[in-house]
Amino acid sequence: MNRLISVCLTLACAIFAALAPIGCETARPSAPVVSFDLEADADRVWAAVVEAAEAMDLMIARADPEARVITTEWQTYSAHLKYGACAGVLPDARLEMRHTIRVVPGDAGATLAFDSRFRMIRNTGAGPLTDCASSGAFEQRFMERTQRALR
């Protein structure tokens, strides 16, 4: 009897180990980094980025002025903004975004780089989390706000 239990436990562990990596979330698409070159020094661009983040009501998780990096919290955005390219947005879904925004010093100015993530979550809890690609609209709008702040 103990041998039978041992064999069953070994078999159950092997099945669990084989299935565990599958998970329930959809695969994350690789998000390309979107960047813009600006003709201003990195310190001025950093100040403008902080101003743009505040103006766009981004929820800042971490701001590192030494590294010139802002990381935001996941936050909800309105579907009419079309920031994420989420196929088949459902009426009971909420759209969320999170960004890492970097100012990278260069020879003739600075580069503003975005690593943006977008996702759709059903409010009812039914169905998986869906990762979405960037439409480029958020990055473009943020860059334009940054340029305005540089003037």
Image (cartoon, grey):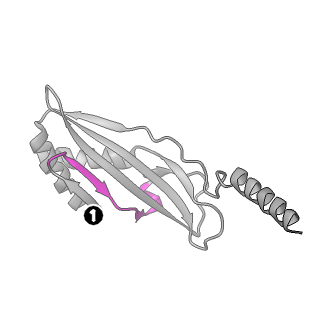
User: Which residue was labeled with disc 1?
Assistant: 57
Q: Is residue 69 magenta?
A: yes
The quarter holding residue 112 reads top left
x then y, percent, for residue 50: 18, 54
Is residue 151 in view from this perspective?
no
Q: Is residue 66 above or below residue 80?
A: above
Give the farthest residue toward the front: 2
- For the image, the number of numbered tags is 1
Which residue is pictured at 83% across the width and 62% down the height?
Answer: 8
Q: Nearer the viewer, residue 58 or 6?
A: 6
Residue nearer the viewer, 50 or 87: 50
Residue at left 43%, top 51%? 117
Q: In the rendered image, which quarter is residue 103 located in?
A: top left
Left or right side of 54 for 3: right
Q: Position of residue 16 (x, y in %)?
A: 72, 57
Say whether residue 23 is visible. Answer: yes
Query: Along the line of sight, which residue is nearer the eye, 130 or 146?
Result: 130
Tag 1: residue type?
Answer: Asp
Q: Secondary structure at mark 1?
A: loop
Confirm whether the magenta stretch covers residue 117.
Answer: no
Mark 1 surroundings: few (<14), some (14-19) or many (≥20) residues within 10 A: few
Where is residue 24? Give x, y as percent: 64, 58
Q: Residue at x 86, y 63 (%)?
A: 3
Q: What percent of the width, then of the height, locates residue 142?
A: 28, 49
Q: Residue furthest bottom?
A: 124
Residue for point 64% across, 51% down: 21
In the figure, is residue 117 to the left or right of 70? Answer: right
Q: Which residues are magenta?
A: 66-81
Rendered-image quadrant of the C terminus: top left
Residue 11: which quarter of the image? bottom right
